[in-house]
Image (cartoon, rainbow, N blue to C red):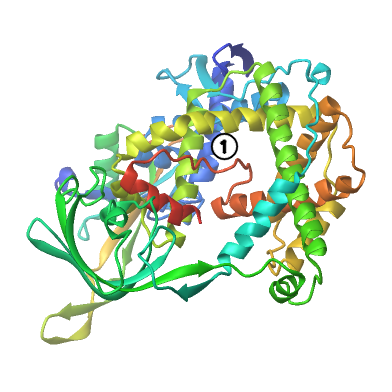
Amino acid sequence: MKVSVEKLPTSEAVLEVDVTWQEMEKASDKAYRKLVQQVDIQGFRKGKAPRSLLERRLGKEYMYNEGLEELISEAYRRALKEHDLTPVTQPKLDIPPFEIGQPYHFSVTIPIIAPVVLGDYRSLHFDREEVEVTSEEVEQDIESQRNNLNTWQSVERPANYNDRVTMDLKFTAEGQTISDLKDNPFELTNERYGVYAGMDEHIVGMQVGESKSFSTTIPNDYSNEKLAGKHGEYQVTLHKVEEKQLPPLDDAWVEKITNGKYQTLEDLRNSVSDRILEDKKRRAREELQEKVVDAVVEQSQMVLHPLLIEEEIENALHRMSHLLQRQHLSLEQYLMIKKQTLEQYKESARPEVERSLKQQLVLSEVGRQEHIEVTAEEVNNLFQLYAQLDQQLPRTDEQRRALEISYRREKTISRLVELTAGPDPDAESEALTQEEAEETAVANAQAAAIAGETEQTPPAVVEQGSESGRTQNESIES
Amino acid sequence: MEITEVLRQGIVTEKTTALQQQNKYTFKVALEANKIDVRRAVETLFNVKVVSVNTMRMPGKAKMMRRRGKAPRSVPAREWKKAIVTLREGQSIDALKA
């Protein structure tokens, strides 16, 4: 059997295989010996029937075809091994009909993952962004904490914005009563959306006990299309006006809200400042990672086979439906909500899938060139980390592999960042990066485990849905 | 006996294919046919020379007869005759050969 391999620029490999008739005979003989064990022929025990009888039963061609199949898969396996090819999907076969006694020729087209040509990523350089915390940011944070813990104080004056009013409200539109509320609290604001939009300005200035009727226009983009853009009639009676009372900003308040963890305002300021700094550092690190990876991908050259993308889209779809199942939604229902057909959805997922595929291929190539290895010990540590998070993972080979792949990826990214932006300036956060990397690895591995994949990519859940779709998305992502 | 009525069918089993090694071919024949009838029939129909014929009456084995509404009972199946024909060296009957 002669096999020649030719790699095409379209990230495909073509095998041209020549087989002599003797080899065909041998292969079909092997096929006979396999088949005879399975076929039942009257008068013979299993596996004892002569070949001529089996041929009469199954057809002569069948036997040769069966042998040919064996030859094809052998040629395929050998080509993959000898030429180090990674197939994407099932190969395409070009098998002409054979003639008995003649040498035979066939060809196999295999979509492969073409090797990635990396750019000179070692010469890339990025600056680490300096992060700092201003005192305004600290004050803002504390202020919002104060705002969340306010109390309401009843006052004798006309209602104003930011007051809380209690009132009866009857709201009709298109001759229908939309809402009929008694003693209902509203916080007056000049940024109100939805069906009550425009109500507040009429209520501002009203006295306790006063009644008023007025009308508004319901916004055009309101989700209920029957009501959008229509006039709404209000009838309100004001019962109570309350003013917002912020707690005093002093040490006693600090002690109260932190359960005695911090005694003075100064302590609280410091801790808030530390937290914001950590936050910013983490975000800067993530941004840097993303920037580096994007740049390296940008530099690299590769060809993605269309079938590879197709397959990955299917995978993404599969993961998505898993995610939806947790929300007790089927994929069909989700698509209905988004008003998309399956085809449209797949198409919208394509750019993201392509991006993550490229990233994945590039990172694995970088990992190879940088000799990044994940030891069994490290994988064990991940398992333990998981156990600490109260999530026992099954110690299966599959799980192990998923963890290993995602952890290698994290390590590769860290290495890339180090190469292009120098070592992390604060030594302390070095350990943190490690820990964080493990955390992300865990999250990634989870996704991989859900999808039952060995390869892992971040799920392509990028939504740019319609207005009504958005609320739905939030619930899905939360 | 008419030669067309003698041979009923060839018998192809593991055992009879093994017998073909000794140039012996096996047939189911009419119960009333004798060795001479079988020899004549095989020689004319397959155009070969027969050296010897062995015949035997095969007993009908007990079969269960099941009919709707009646209790199943054991009924003997019909008896038949088997003939093993030895051909002259070098000759064969391709229709039966495996």
**Where residue B25 sits: x, y (%)?**
39, 46
Q: As displayed, is residue A310 above or below residue A426? A: above
Residue A404 in sight here: no
**Where residue A180 sits: x, y (%)?**
20, 71
**Where residue B2 sits: x, y (%)?**
14, 46
Residue displayed at 37% across by 58% down: A329
Query: Extreme left residue here?
Result: A175
Residue A268 found in image quarter:
bottom right
The residue pinned by badge 1 equals A30
Q: As displayed, is residue A157 above or below residue A407? A: below
Residue displayed at 75% across by 41% down: A410
Question: Camera-side residue: A245 or A475?
Answer: A245
Query: Extreme right residue here?
Result: A427
- Dot 1: chain letter: A
Question: Camera-side residue: A212 or A395?
Answer: A212
Q: Secondary structure at mark 1?
A: helix
